[in-house]
Image: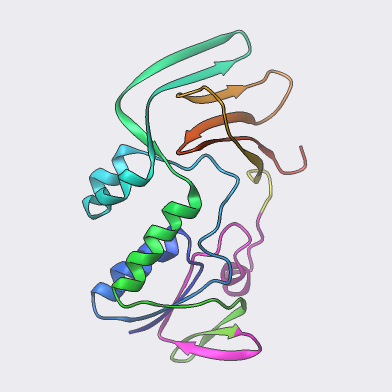
Amino acid sequence: MDVGIVGAGPAGAFCAERLARRGHAVTLFDPSHPREKACGGGVTPGVFARYPELAALRSLGHPVKRARLRAGSSGVDVELPEPIDIFSRQRFDGALLERALAAGAVLEPRRVRRARAEESGAGLLVDGEWRGFDLVVGADGAASAVRRCLLGEKPGGPGGYATAGFHVSGLPEDELFVEFLPDMRGYLWSFPRPGHSSVGIAAPVGA
């Protein structure tokens, strides 16, 4: 099959690698990856157990075996039986993308504006030109253009969350920290990464 994948983040890159290794022609569209993101970057041990071929990526992360969870005056400290590996998204996403390219996928750093169903598959509008594929995968995030065009769904709604984060150097923490505040919907996080910590807030859209 000729497959077009919109988005070269973890989902898109991993999908591209697996399809390319099975002999399909795969084109990834993404003008921005690999890039940093305002998120914790934690990958649980269950991911590596399910996909052992990704074990080599663990050396790029920072293993954390202790988590602190707080809610007002209450809290719990958890010693994890296996570490959660916390990554810079730029390095993690970049490593997954390199694996996809090594498997034979092709990256076009171009933005997909629209998608449409066609008689023999699906089409993507790339820089004003419609490109046809047997199969299209939408891995382009919460505001997915593929989803909006093919399903008509819009992101957000009652379950929609937004995040804002910062990369902070010099923090002494070596623990994963999440705090829920009584007067705020959402939560605060601090995840130690290699060389810095990812610190931020997640809250419902509009709140």
Report the front residue among 120 and 78: 78
Note whether 88 is above or below 45 in the view shown: below
Q: Residue at x 48, y 66 (%)?
A: 8
Residue 46: x percent and y percent?
Answer: 30, 40
Residue most extreme to the top: 73
Question: Where does the image place residue 39, in percent across and percent down from the top left?
Answer: 56, 43
Quadrant housing the N terminus: bottom left
Residue drawn 60% across and 57% down? 142
Q: Quadrant of residue 99?
A: bottom left
Residue 16 image point, x, y percent = 37, 70
- State the residue at coordinates (31%, 44%): 59
Q: Is the C terminus in the top left, top right, bottom left or bottom right quadrant?
A: top right
Q: Which residue is depicted at the point 64% across and 39% down? A: 166
Q: Nearer the viewer, residue 204 or 68?
A: 68
Which residues, given as a range, are shown in magenta? Answer: 126-155
- Kindly indicate the quadrant of the structure image that contains residue 165: top right
